[in-house]
Image (cartoon, rainbow, N blue to C red):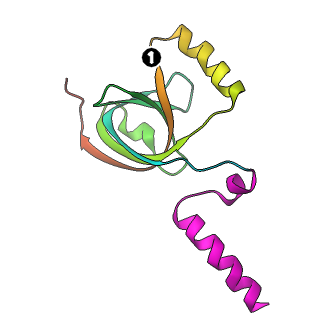
């Protein structure tokens, strides 16, 4: 019994430390590459989502279950997280929303940490 627990801990602890969902891994979702972006945090085009335009001009769609992004709207921040890939259906749905808006999204980022750079975004 203790051998089974040790084996489970051997696999589960690194997964949890990296912030990866064991359920997502079992469902076949692959974690993206770690990414850091600095820019102005803004509301996203969909409720509960946010966006950031990086210093390189790329716009990222952000979401997080661990970081309270809404507390930093309008702040210049540095966010770190994993890139995520959407299904074709999700891309199509978002494409319809983006066609109504003006931003083109570079990629999605699931934020795991946030550092505030400034309380305002200067141009």
| Element type where label 1 sits in the image | loop
Q: Residue furthest top?
A: 100
Instruction: From the viewer's side, name the closer residue of 71 and 106.
Output: 106
Which residue shows up at 74% across the image and 89% down it?
Answer: 3
Is residue 105 something that shows in the picture? yes
Quarter of the image for the C terminus: give it: top left
- Residue 9: percent from the left, percent from the top? 65, 78
Is 101 left or right of 90, judged from the image as shown?
left
The residue that mark 1 highlights is 103
Question: Closer to the camera, 72 or 77?
Answer: 77
Q: How many marks?
A: 1
The image shows residue 66 at horizontal and vertical percentages of 51, 52
Q: Residue at x 45, y 27 (%)?
A: 43
Is 27 above or below relative to 97?
A: below
Apparent side of residue 40 relative to residue 120 in the rendered image (left or right): right
Q: Position of residue 60 (x, y in %)?
A: 44, 31
| Side of 86 where 5 appears, left or right | right
Let me know if residue 111 appears in the view.
no
Judge whether residue 120 is colored magenta: no
Q: Position of residue 101 (x, y in %)?
A: 50, 11
Stretch of the chain drawn in magenta? 1-27
Q: Is residue 73 above or below residue 33?
A: above
- Quarter of the image for residue 90 reads top right
For the point 19% across and 27% down, the residue is 122
Q: Which residue is the extreme one toward the bottom?
A: 2
Q: Main secondary structure of the magenta part?
A: helix
Structural crowding at the residue carrying mark 1, measured as other residues with C-alpha within 10 Å and reported as few (<14), some (14–19) or many (≥20): some
Tell me the quarter of the picture where residue 103 sits: top left
Q: Please check the rendered image and state whether residue 19 is part of the magenta-colored stretch, yes or no.
A: yes
- Front-lying residue, 53 or 70: 53
Residue placed at 52% from the left, 66% from the top?
17
Q: Kindly give the residue lying farthest to the left in the view shown.
A: 122
């Amino acid at each position: 019994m203790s051998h089974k627990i040790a084996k489970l801990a051997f696999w589960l602890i690194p997964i949890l430390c990296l912030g990866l969902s064991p359920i997502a891994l079992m469902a076949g979702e692959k974690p993206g590459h770690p990414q850091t972006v600095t820019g102005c945090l803004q509301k996203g085009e969909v409720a509960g989502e946010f966006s950031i335009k990086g210093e390189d001009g790329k716009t990222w769609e952000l979401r997080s279950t661990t970081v309270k992004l809404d507390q930093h709207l309008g702040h210049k921040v540095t966010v770190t997280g994993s890139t995520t890939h959407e299904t074709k259906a999700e891309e199509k749905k978002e494409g319809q929303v983006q066609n109504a808006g003006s931003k083109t999204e570079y990629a999605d980022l699931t934020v795991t940490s946030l550092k505030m750079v400034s309380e305002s975004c200067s141009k």
